[in-house]
Image: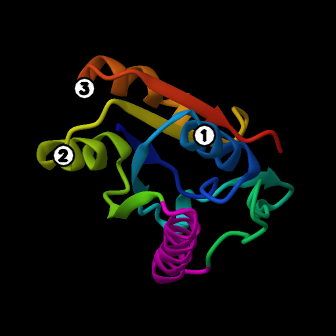
């Protein structure tokens, strides 16, 4: 059985990641641990505008920028619960939790107690992704010695 660590937040229910998970499930027995870095509301995607910053709807899910960290956590938990329910409905072994807002820290904590064959990182498009700008996929691959597949939302 192949074991995958899936790291995503705003893109968790997006079609690109869902397609990738289906492909892995169809390829053979798989289990998934879904890690959702608990992003602060201030770090949700926003674009500069005249006179300040205008919150933009999530590139994938149209949640918009949460008004508070508590709302951001509630949205992250809702996405996590939905993807775990979807995987359970497909009779796929899956578990997951919210983790540190710092993805490398969150990944390290999960890897301290579990073993995986691969890490799958799902991000916003390059223009909006703090994770891609910080080179998260390559940093994770170097630091943890596991192959990392990056899934980038198209919109």
The CA distance from mark 2 to mark 3 is 12 Å
Q: Which of the 4 image quadrants contains residue 143?
A: top left
Pointer 1 residue = 26
Horizontal relation, residue 85 to residue 33: left or right: right
Tell me the residue at 31%/57% (across/down). Answer: 100
> In the image, which is nearer the foreground, mark 3 or mark 1?
1
**Rendering coords of residue 125 (x, y %):** 72, 38
**Rendering coords of residue 62 (x, y %):** 79, 67
Label for residue 144?
3
Q: Secondary structure at mark 3?
A: helix
Tell me the residue at 13%/44% (across/down). Answer: 112
Pointer 2 residue = 114
| Sequence-first disc among 2 and 1 | 1
Secondary structure mostly taken by the magenta-highlighted segment of the chain = helix
Q: Which coloring applies here?
A: rainbow
Q: Which of the 4 image quadrants contains residue 150?
A: top right
| Sequence-first disc among 2 and 3 | 2
Tell me where the magenta segment starts and ends, as one range.
67-91
Q: Nearer the viewer, residue 98 or 95?
A: 95
Tell me the residue at 22%/41% (across/down). Answer: 108
Q: Is residue 81 magenta?
A: yes
Q: Is residue 49 magenta?
A: no
Q: Tell me whether the residue at label 2 lies in contact with that at label 1, contact meaning CB atoms closer than 8 angstroms.
A: no
Q: Tell me whether the residue at label 3 lies in contact with that at label 1, contact meaning CB atoms closer than 8 angstroms.
A: no
> In the image, which is nearer the foreground, mark 2 or mark 1?
1
Query: Mark 3 packing: few (<14 Cα in 10 Å), some, or many (20+)?
Result: some
Q: Secondary structure at mark 2?
A: loop
């Amino acid at each position: 059985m192949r074991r995958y660590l899936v790291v995503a937040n705003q893109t968790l229910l997006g079609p690109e990641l869902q397609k990738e998970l289906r492909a892995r499930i169809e390829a053979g027995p798989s289990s998934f641990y879904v890690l959702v870095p608990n992003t602060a509301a201030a770090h949700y995607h926003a674009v500069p505008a005249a006179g300040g910053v205008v919150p933009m709807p999530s590139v994938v899910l149209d949640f918009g920028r949460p008004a508070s960290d508590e709302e951001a956590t509630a949205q992250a938990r809702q996405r996590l619960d939905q993807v775990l329910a979807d995987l359970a409905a497909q009779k796929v072994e899956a578990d997951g939790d919210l983790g540190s807002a710092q993805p490398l820290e969150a990944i390290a904590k999960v890897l301290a107690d579990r073993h995986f064959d691969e890490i799958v990182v799902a991000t916003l498009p390059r223009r909006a992704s703090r994770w891609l700008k910080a080179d998260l996929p390559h940093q994770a691959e170097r630091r943890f010695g596991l192959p990392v597949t990056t899934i980038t939302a198209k919109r």
